[in-house]
């Protein structure tokens, strides 16, 4: 069983910064990639950023230059540094992990965190 635990959300004024963390625990062979999604009230969940275990990253256009994703493979933890926050960044942020199981052959594991609320006031 795999668990993703997020932390770091909260209330911040526009222009401020927050750092989200997501730690993976449980039984798995390896993490292939991790990502952050967000869901604003009344909207669909959208992909914000992804990172592979080798450090390749991708970002949603609206957060490029403001958000930075990073991964600590030793700690099985992904971070999202969010700077210059805007009210439109307000959402519940979810961590996602693409993992491989310890079975032979390994099978894919698709894990989600419980979400952490980020509120940006104007």
Image (tube, rainbow, N blue to C red):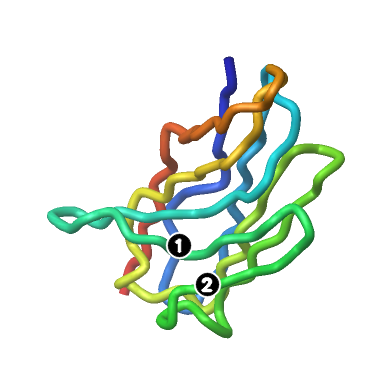
In this rendering, the answer to whether 8 lies above or below 44 is above
Residues at circles 1 and 2 in contact by the CB criterion of under 8 Å:
yes
Which residue does the numbered mark 1 point to in the structure image? 12
- Position of residue 45 measured from the top left corner of the image (x, y, whole percent): 29, 54
Q: Residue at x 81, y 38 (%)?
A: 75
In this rendering, the answer to whether 80 lies above or below 24 is below
Q: Residue at x 44, y 74 (%)?
A: 60
Q: Secondary structure at mark 1?
A: strand
- Quadrant containing the C terminus is bottom left
Observer-nearest residue: 98 or 79? 98
Occupied quadrant, residue 42: bottom left
Q: Residue at x 50, y 44 (%)?
A: 95
Q: Is residue 65 left or right of residue 53?
A: left
- Position of residue 76 measured from the top left corner of the image (x, y, whole percent): 75, 38
In this rendering, the answer to whether 43 lies above or below 105 is below
Q: Residue at x 36, y 57 (%)?
A: 119
- Quadrant containing the N terminus is top right
Which residue does the numbered mark 2 point to in the structure image? 16
- Position of residue 49 measured from the top left corner of the image (x, y, whole percent): 52, 64
């Amino acid at each position: 069983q795999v668990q993703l635990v997020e932390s770091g959300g909260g209330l911040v004024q526009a222009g401020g910064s927050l750092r989200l963390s997501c730690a993976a625990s449980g039984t798995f062979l390896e993490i292939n990639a991790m990502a952050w999604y967000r869901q604003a009230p009344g909207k669909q969940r959208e992909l914000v950023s992804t990172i592979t275990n080798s450090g390749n990253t991708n970002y949603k256009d609206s957060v490029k230059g403001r958000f930075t994703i990073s991964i600590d493979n030793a700690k099985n933890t992904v971070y999202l540094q969010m700077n210059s926050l805007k009210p439109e960044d307000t959402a519940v942020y979810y961590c996602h992990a693409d993992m491989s199981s310890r079975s032979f052959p390994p099978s894919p594991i698709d894990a989600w965190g419980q979400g952490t609320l980020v509120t940006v006031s104007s």
